[in-house]
Image (cartoon, helix red, strand yellow):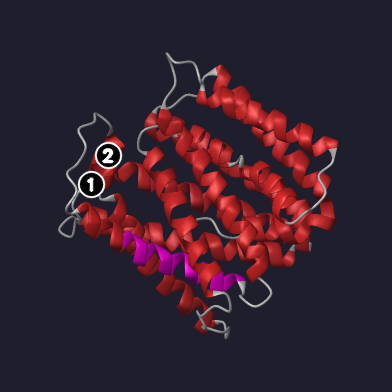
């Protein structure tokens, strides 16, 4: 098996694990507490990652040479993925996943604005087509519009901003350090959010996501605790696989295989939740995937490092 094939295998398995993580988070909407899941995932996942680093002889230094930037990046990750998981509770998993995949378009735009990277007409066209696909999924028609659909897009934006920050910090902060910062941010910001929500009355809204967000923490339900443990384990394993995949394979070759997650999300949605995407949503997903793959291919080897940085850290 070639290096690229091993890299592709790591990516596909990692995408499958992330899909299982999302499946469990969506399944727990009527039983668990979203904030509890985020905090405990950070605690358990971070511990598992440190154990992996120790067992493989890697550095377990979790400090940062860029404390302010790392703090900002951790905030972006926390609130971005909190919004994504909030959306999962109230919209089809395939649609939420596909909307998150507009992140390459935001990243390309931000790279041009912040890093002054050149962006040609072909990629500009791909970005426009990709955002058209996003609109087909969101359906901005007043009769069909669901504001929750904007949350995965917000997650994609904050994710892209955090990856731009990672471009500055990667010289001295390793990918594993950056991942630890993500977990630490989940613990600190999640605990703070939980304390604030204890004194805020739950809004009156007929939305499953609201109850999921405000529900008290659960410690007497074995299923919930086991599910949180599995979420933490598969999420951390997925991150390690992605890091391994991009280290052994050519990012320009293996990055498009991240879109296997969307295929898995469609299958998961149909099997477990009876969520069948309509024709407009399927068309939008196709436009997003096609445009994203085009951007990956167009950037090629010259953009290999930014692609790897973008894809390694899924919340």
Could you tell me which secondary element the residue under label 2 belongs to? helix
Instruction: Give percent across and percent down for residue 278.
Output: 52, 19
Question: In the figure, 67 relative to 114: above or below?
Answer: below
Relative placement, left or right, of 60 versus 116 is left
Residue 290: x %, y % from top left: 72, 34
Instruction: Kindly identify the residue that appears in the image at 37 percent across and 47 percent down.
Output: 24
Element type at mark 1: helix
Res. 227 in view: no
Q: Tag 1: Cα neighbours inside 10 Å, few (<14), some, or many (≥20)? A: some
Taking 82 as reference, is 135 above or below it?
A: above
Q: Position of residue 178 (x, y in %)?
A: 55, 69
Number of numbered discs overlaid on the protein picture: 2
Q: Residue at x 58, y 79 (%)?
A: 65
Q: Which mark is residue 214?
A: 1
Residue depicted at 68% across the width and 49% down the height: 110
Q: Whole-Å distance between the Cαs marked 2 and 1?
A: 6 Å
> Residue 4 shows which numbered tag?
none
Whether label 2 touches label 1, CB < 8 Å: yes
Q: Quadrant of residue 269?
A: top left
Q: Residue furthest top?
A: 143
Q: Relative to 90, is 63 above or below?
A: below
Magenta residue check for 81: no
To which residue does mark 2 refer? 210
Confirm whether residue 95 shows in the render: yes
**Residue range of the region highlighted in magenta in the rendering:** 175-190
189 or 95: nearer the viewer? 189
Residue in the picture at 51% in, 21% down: 139
Out of 107 and 18, give the one closest to the viewer: 107
Image coordinates for residue 195, horizontal then vertical, percent: 22, 59
């Amino acid at each position: 098996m070639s290096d690229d094939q091993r890299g592709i295998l790591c990516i596909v398995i990692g995408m499958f694990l992330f899909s299982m993580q999302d499946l469990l988070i969506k399944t727990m909407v009527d039983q668990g507490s979203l904030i509890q899941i985020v905090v405990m995932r950070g605690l358990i996942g971070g511990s598992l990652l440190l154990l992996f680093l120790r067992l493989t002889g890697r550095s377990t230094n979790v400090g940062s040479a860029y404390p302010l930037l790392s703090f900002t990046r951790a905030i972006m990750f926390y609130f971005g993925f909190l919004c994504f998981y909030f959306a999962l509770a109230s919209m089809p998993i395939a649609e939420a996943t596909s909307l998150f995949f507009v992140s390459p378009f935001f990243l390309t735009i931000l790279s041009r604005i912040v890093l002054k990277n050149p962006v040609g007409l072909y990629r500009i066209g791909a970005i426009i087509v990709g955002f058209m696909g996003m609109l087909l999924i969101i359906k901005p028609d007043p009769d069909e519009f669901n504001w929750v659909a904007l949350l995965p897009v917000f997650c994609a934006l904050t994710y892209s901003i955090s990856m731009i920050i990672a471009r500055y910090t990667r010289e001295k902060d390793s990918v594993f350090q950056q991942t630890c910062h993500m977990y630490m941010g989940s613990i600190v910001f999640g605990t703070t959010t939980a304390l604030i929500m204890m004194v805020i009355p739950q809004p009156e809204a007929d939305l499953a996501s609201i109850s999921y967000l405000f529900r008290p923490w659960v410690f007497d339900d074995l299923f919930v605790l086991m599910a949180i443990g599995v979420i933490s384990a598969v999420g951390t394993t997925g991150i390690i696989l992605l890091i391994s995949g991009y280290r052994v394979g050519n990012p320009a070759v293996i990055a498009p295989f991240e879109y296997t997650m969307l295929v898995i999300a469609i299958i998961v949605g149909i099997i477990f939740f009876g969520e069948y995407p309509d024709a407009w949503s399927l068309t939008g997903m196709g436009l997003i995937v096609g445009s994203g793959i085009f951007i990956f291919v167009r950037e090629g080897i010259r953009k290999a490092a930014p692609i790897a940085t973008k894809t390694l850290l899924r919340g």
